[in-house]
Amino acid sequence: MSDVSKSADYDVVVIGAGAAGLNAALVLARARRRVAVVDTGEPRNAPAAHMQGFLSRDGMPSAALLEVGRAEVAGYGVDLIDGRVDHIGPGFTVHLAGGAALRARRLVVATGLRDELPEIPGVAERWGKDVLHCPYCHGYEVRGRPIGVLGTSPIGVHQALLLRQWSEDVVLFTHAMELSGEDHERLTARGVRVIDGDIKRVVAANDRVSGVELADGRIVPRSVVFLFPRMVPHDALLTALGCATENGWVVTDRTGRTSVAGVWAVGNVADARAQVVTAAGMGSAAAMAVNTDLLEEDVDRAVEQRRATAAATVGGDGR
């Protein structure tokens, strides 16, 4: 990581060094833009040992992908800065905690989101190991095993129906959910067992999930548990800049452009559904849009300078 002790100027400052931020930096650096990436080193997927569904990177440790990505962008001259953005001032001056400031012509914000977990004992301790949320990310690895779905979100019914593709033994624990008659019919038809009652805790033994304990003392053996967390975007920097939001998420176009000119948002800060491969693609799309935007500005400046030079020449000749 680079050490920035005073102000520095960049074409683009990327905030966040996950797949979205690093891929944006890579494309911009290859376009010969001066780029800095600021990151706190706290990736959302840190608890997960591997990532899946990324062509040519399937099963690769998440940390390894980011390590390779950082090395690639550094090879193109990108400044990687270990730090936290305190606030963004006028003219896209990015103030870091500690006093340093980076001046940018454009911003790409890739700060991700946080998963708010239900306050059920055992959930946080096993999160990312055998308490999971994404069937497409982890379903194949737990295929054929007894799966429990915690009904802590309305998405629980869909999760249970979907997970039936990977296991014949799926149980939905309703917990706080109220299922409709149609829900019961669909679950039963799909072969999903429904168990009512409040959940007391997720039980673990020998460093692995072994079951789900209910408030009445029953323990239902399970070897893996799924739930849907509340996903909260790390969008404070974007909202402070005045970026428009809708239903709690920053509004962007297909390239990640926000309502504030010169600001793009990519990855999970803008789309909760974005997996690693999706986030990387979002970063690439944003980078091309950012470079095009900078190009238009560069051309406009060149035209203005040429006109000014021509006018000064004419004036010097006395015509």
Image (spheres, helix red, strand yellow):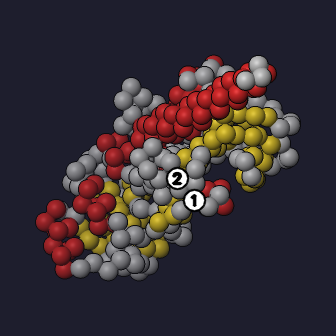
Q: Quadrant of residue 197?
A: bottom left
Q: Are marks 1 and 2 in contact (CB under 8 Å)?
A: yes
Say which label, 1 or 2, has the lower sequence index: 1
Task: Tell me the residue at 86%/46% (across/down).
Answer: 99
Residue 206: in sight, yes or no? no
Instruction: Quadrant for residue 237, please give it.
Output: bottom right
Q: Residue at x 55, y 46 (%)?
A: 264
159 or 85: nearer the viewer? 85
Instruction: Work out which quarter of the rendered image holds the C terminus and state it.
Output: top right
* Amino acid type at image mark 1: Cys
Residue at numbered disc 2: 258
- Please name the residue that numbered disc 1 is placed on: 243
Residue 199 at what x, y percent from top left? 43, 73
- Residue depicted at 41% across the width and 61% down the height: 227
Q: Secondary structure at mark 2?
A: loop
Q: Amino acid at mark 2?
A: Thr
Cα separation, mark 1 vs mark 2, equals: 6 Å
At mark 1, the secondary structure is loop
Residue at 65% across / 28% down in the picture?
Answer: 307
Q: Compared with residue 70, is residue 96 higher up or lower down, i.e. above or below?
A: below
Please state if 153 lies on the left or on the right of 129 as rendered.
left
Side of 157 where 181 appears, left or right? left
Residue 212 visible within the image: yes
- Location of residue 168 in the rendering, given as x and y in whole percent from the top left corner: 21, 54
Percent position of residue 313, x then y: 74, 21
Disc 2 packing (10 Å; few <14; some 14–19; many ≥20): many
Image quarter in which the N terminus is found: top right
Q: Relative to the observer, which residue lies in front, 150 or 211?
A: 150
Q: Residues within 10 Å of mark 1 (few under 14, many from 20)?
A: many
Image coordinates for residue 36, horizontal then vertical, percent: 68, 34
